[in-house]
Amino acid sequence: MAIINQLMSWTSHDAATLTAFDGVIDQYLRYSTQTMSTLEGIQDQDPDFALGHLFRGYQLKMASDPRFFEPIEQSVIAAEQTAGNARERAHVAALKAWQRNDTDKTSTLLGEILATDPTDLIALKAANHLHFYRGDAPAMLGAIQDSLPHWPQDHPWRSFIIGMQAFGFEECGDYDQALGCGHAAVAAEPLDMWAAHAVAHVHQMQGDFEAGIDWIDDCLPSWAQTNNFSNHLIWHKALMLIDFGQAEQALTLFDEALVDCLKDDFYLDVCNAASLLWRLEMKGLDLGERWEMLRPYYHRARDQELVFVALHYVMVAVKNGDQEIIESALDNLSRWAQQPQEQGRICRAVGLDTANALVDLAQGSARRGVDQLTSLVPELHQIGGSHAQRALFTDFIHHYS
């Protein structure tokens, strides 16, 4: 029996499809660059495989790129036409809601799926992503805690759930549990970058920068063939170099490891670059024309996917002093803040004001920007991301005060 079908039932007219799809999940959990191409091969052989369409749609949506709206629509339609049981139809409903950016409904539907089938890895991963980008660490950890007891000790994917648990513990401030789970998960599978990421976060949050740098250096050789998430781990190393008093080395690391990947136009790479450059600038380093490298991604300032991401594109515009793009981005955020969906509410509560504060910091009204950010700090977690990522905003307050 296929691994994906051991704890729950998926439908396929060809039994070989599910066994082949195990390979997709193996690659996905290990951050392979081949995951989607492997999936395409399966779908070519079995176009009626609903889970393949659902997985593709979820992956495209998690890329937070509105250019994928039509491909997601194609996946939704195909999944709707081929769903063979109630849980697959529930996934179709969740994906359709997410495509419309109704993340409240999406989370509710995913929660209902997990209540019935707690080992539904597809639902668990999607729910984890949504909890993370609404800044709800307790819900993120809670969903994993509810799922883990249902995974047999010898299940080949169980360690990855423990790796997810590690990050949940870290974001909830339980660093001892996070380290224990993270180390266990990486020992079981060195390619579990999410677990390695959790351990790096613990070192960063506890101020143990030398150990954190060593940890990432020890892990890096295992990640030579992984996808862009490895860049985020390198970004963490750069942050720890800054905090360890080695800002020049962090800038060198940016040049060597975090520039070429920008051509992929993946939101996290641009977020890494923007936040790191501003941190380095606050350390007094001359960045030359490095902000200019991010100009090609101005078009993303019109996105309405995640407020956390949008704010980083605002950073790029304000640091390059491009007033037309700044005004366009603020207008986009103003319109977004009028929308009833969850990210619209977050934009209304904290996103738009934070963006205006970034403009103030860069355009000579630092006192006003600091006051604005200070007033927002208690609710800033709503934009999502991690504690380490959001620390940039408190860094602004301290630097510009």
Image (cartoon, rainbow, N blue to C red):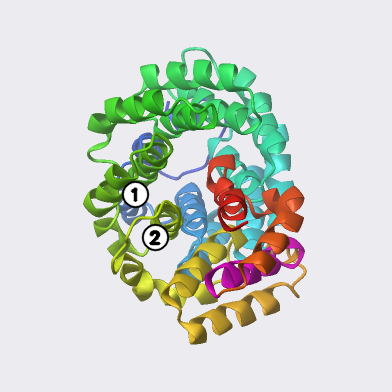
Q: Quadrant of residue 225?
A: top left
Q: Image check: 30 left or right of 315?
A: left
Identified at 58% across, 35% down, the residue is: 120
How far across and down, in percent of the image, does residue 357 sit?
64, 67
Q: Please report contact status of discs 1 and 2: CB closer than 8 Å, yes or no.
A: yes
How far across and down, in percent of the image, does residue 71 sit?
45, 67
How far across and down, in percent of the image, does residue 156 sit?
42, 21
Q: Image check: 281 left or right of 38?
A: right
Residues packed near mark 1 inside 10 Å, few (<14), some (14 to 19) or many (20 plus)? some
Q: Nearer the viewer, residue 321 or 308?
A: 321
Residue 357 within the segment the image draws in magenta: yes
Residue at mark 1: 228
Which quarter of the image is occupied by the N terminus? top left
- Residue range corresponding to the magenta coloring: 347-363
Residue at far bottom of view: 324
Q: Secondary structure at mark 1?
A: loop
For the residue marked with disc 2, what is the amino acid? Phe
Q: Image check: 317 left or right of 19?
A: right
Vertical comparison of 74 with 384: above or below: below
Residue at mark 2: 266
Q: Which mark is residue 88?
A: none
For the residue marked with disc 1, what is the amino acid? Asn
